[in-house]
Amino acid sequence: MGTGELYLGGVIDPTTGKHDPAEPVLYESRRLTTHGVIVGMTGSGKTGLGIITLEEALLSGIPVLAIDPKGDIGNLLLTFPRLDAHDFRPWIDEGEAHRAGEDADTFAAGVANLWKSGLADWGIDGDRIARLKETARFTIYTPGSQAGVPLNIVGSLVAPDIDWSTDAETGRDEIEAFVSSLLVLAGIEADPISTEHILLSNLIEISWQAGRSLDLESLIAQVQNPPLRKLGVFDIDTFFPPKDRTKLAMRLNGLIASPSFVSWTQGVPLDPQTLLYTPEGAPRAAIIYLQHLGDQERQFVVTLLLSKMVTWIRRRPGTSDLRALIYMDEVFGFAPPTAEPPSKKPILTILKQARAHGVGMLLSTQNPVDLDYKAMSNAGTWMIGRLQTQRDKARILEGLESSSGAVDIDHFDDLIGDLEERQFVLHSTQEQQPTLFGTRWAMSYLRGPLTKEDLMKLTEDAPERLVAEMSAPEPNALDDDETTLVPQVPDSVPTYYLDPAAPWASVVGAIPGGTRFEAAVVARVNLLYDDARAGVDHREVWETVLHPVGDPVDLDGGRAVDYDDRDFRPDAPEGATYTLPDAPIGTATFFRKLGTDLRTWLVANQHVEVFKNPVLKLYARIGESRDDFERRCEAAAVDGADIDIAKLKDRYKVKIDRVRDQLATADRRIRELEADTQALREQELIAGAGELLSVFLGGKRGSRSLSGVASRRSQTVRKKERLRSAQERYSDKAAALDDLEAELAEDVTEIMDRWNAAATSIETLTIGLEKTDVAVDEIALVWIPVA
């Protein structure tokens, strides 16, 4: 047997009905690049033929992806090179041994001998079995279960590494497959032109084109708040109203909220390269066990798996050799002729396109009427076993004719009609005549369908299981009060995401780069402070942030902030989780009540204070400092004092002017009297000298002279007396003037003291709010990154 040849069995002599080991059926592996179909009723041996084909492919170094709905293909792991009863013993059905009338050990020895002799008849020994085990690594994957190696199906939302400018079709096919299977799993009709399908597909494509991977939680969050404004010519809310989007999100959330769904997110990634090859490049046999799943879950797995394969295949270079083989042990329900399940499109795509890339698909079914004619027409290899009904035979003959063109239908009819167990008609579109052959003995122990317990025994030491366990997310990664879905708020309430670079972000504990968000409320309120007496008509904008949002909201704990649109982002970062607040933020009633409570709180707690001077009847302006107001009061007091002093001076001026006039009159009188007195004295001296001479000369004249002297002397004395009196009056008037000026100075000082006291008579006036003075402009919800 040369490299690239699949040893399937031996040619049967039509005359004897026996196979001849000397004439083996060696089928070129590269012929399977044109795909193949194995058809046969239950008990025909088609599963055994499928396993034999996989054994041969793996021995040729061809990796295998086997989709196993029935649980039989795991028998590939039951290979025992020693063909020893001890190796068979753990896999013996003790019930079957009991029915045979033997104990399990004896029965195991019989099975071992049967397998040894059966293989020997076909020229196969333990060395070939050992080579099979050495050539490939066998792994049984159990999506949605921990029985085998878990497979992270949901991880298929990882963005593919493709060039969207040239290979958008590949990405969109994968998206369509994922969305269709997800909707089916959620019990929603997976019509590609439905609003649900279109929205989900666009959300995934937007993220993938940006190179961003997704998970179901973030996808559901985007359903509620799509990062797009239009779909087609309609805005998003018209095309898919928010209420309907919420229903879809709830439906999908119900899916992932199921405890059993956790297992779908655990395990090794759904990566075809990893499934088919070891890191060293050795081939793998990746068996996808589906027996434990329901129909919708099987659709989910097969669709995602094959859509990933389509992407992987399209990225392979062209070749005419068989690079990998995809095997489906029972294709029933996955590619029916009259329905469009999500799995059908990737199956047909592989059948049409994979050949050029060296990937073959081999489909096995017991119901050929349930296989789409397009699938049958793309098959280049046919292996036909015993069929149950004439209808099945007619369907096969029709398929052969459509795929091969001119065939001898009557000859095929005769061959198919006489087949026995483990006998098949092999037809290749590259050959003129079919081959009737019997399958060789399988190197794998065909125990039958494996149970979950069997799978656990087979995979308990598998390195892939350890990797899966290490990569599995914590099942309780989120606290009970956390969610990956943004909690809904009424449409009337704006929703923002705080930018950690906002000036006030640190006040509420925002963490740059944080992905866990807590709810806060920001409010903007217009306030009017008015007081007619104080001449105050002041308007201001009051803003606050309330965090955390409790029930009721702690308004006393609000923090004054100055916010605007630059402080917020429209969208949450990837991987955001939300802490559910105690407050019922999903109701409009909550926000209406918050607005009412906020008004009441502001009336009770918010006010402004201004300074007033009741004596001067002055009021400070809003925001005027005490120092500035004091200076203004001092200036007003100085003006008041100046007016009072001016009035006082006017009153004193009459008195002072009168006294000054009297003083001036007295001064003139003194000067007059002084002049008169001086003149009299001079006259008295001159006259006295003459008269004194006359006295000395004698006579009457001398007597008269003495009398004149005395008279003049008397006049002088009287003048002096009048002068003294005048001087005394002057002194009195001068003293009176001094008294008036002193009295004026005292009155001025009293005025200054009184006005100085008035300037310092400063009090505080509190101006509060009434409900009509408070107008709530905005109440919005803000998500704050706290971790």
Image (tube, rainbow, N blue to C red):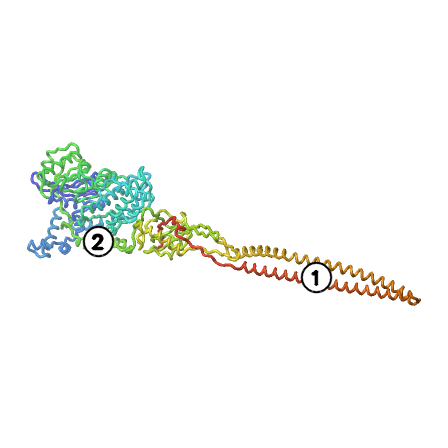
Q: Can residue 400 be seen in this snapshot?
A: yes
Q: Name the residue nearer the viewer: 28 or 124.
A: 28
238 horizontally vs 123: left or right: right
- Residue 726 position within the rendered picture, expressed as x and y whole percent measured from the top left: 75, 62
User: In which image quadrant can residue 555 be found?
Assistant: bottom left
Left or right: residue 116 versus residue 203 is left
Type of amino acid at the residue the image marks with label 2: Gln
The residue at which mark 2 appears reads as 146
- Give the quarter of the figure containing the C terminus: bottom left
Looking at the rendering, which quadrant does residue 748 occupy? bottom right
Q: Residue at x 12, y 50 (%)?
A: 115
Q: Is mark 1 on a helix, strand or loop?
A: helix
277 to 103, vertically: above or below:
above
Which residue is pictured at 68% across the width and 57% down the height?
A: 658
| Type of amino acid at the residue the image marks with label 1 | Lys
Q: Which circle, 2 or 1, is nearer the viewer?
A: 1
- Residue placed most toward the observer, 572 or 362: 572
- Residue 281 visible in the displayed image: no
Which label belongs to residue 733? 1
Q: Earlier in the sequence, mark 2 or mark 1?
A: 2
Q: Dividing the image into 4 quarters, which one contains the N terminus?
A: top left
Crowd band around label 2 with a 10 angstrom C-alpha radius: few (<14), some (14–19), many (20+): many
Where's residue 374, x and y in %? 19, 36
Q: Is residue 343 above or below residue 98?
A: above
Q: Which of 227 and 319 is in front in this view?
A: 227
Q: Position of residue 392 (x, y in %)?
A: 12, 38
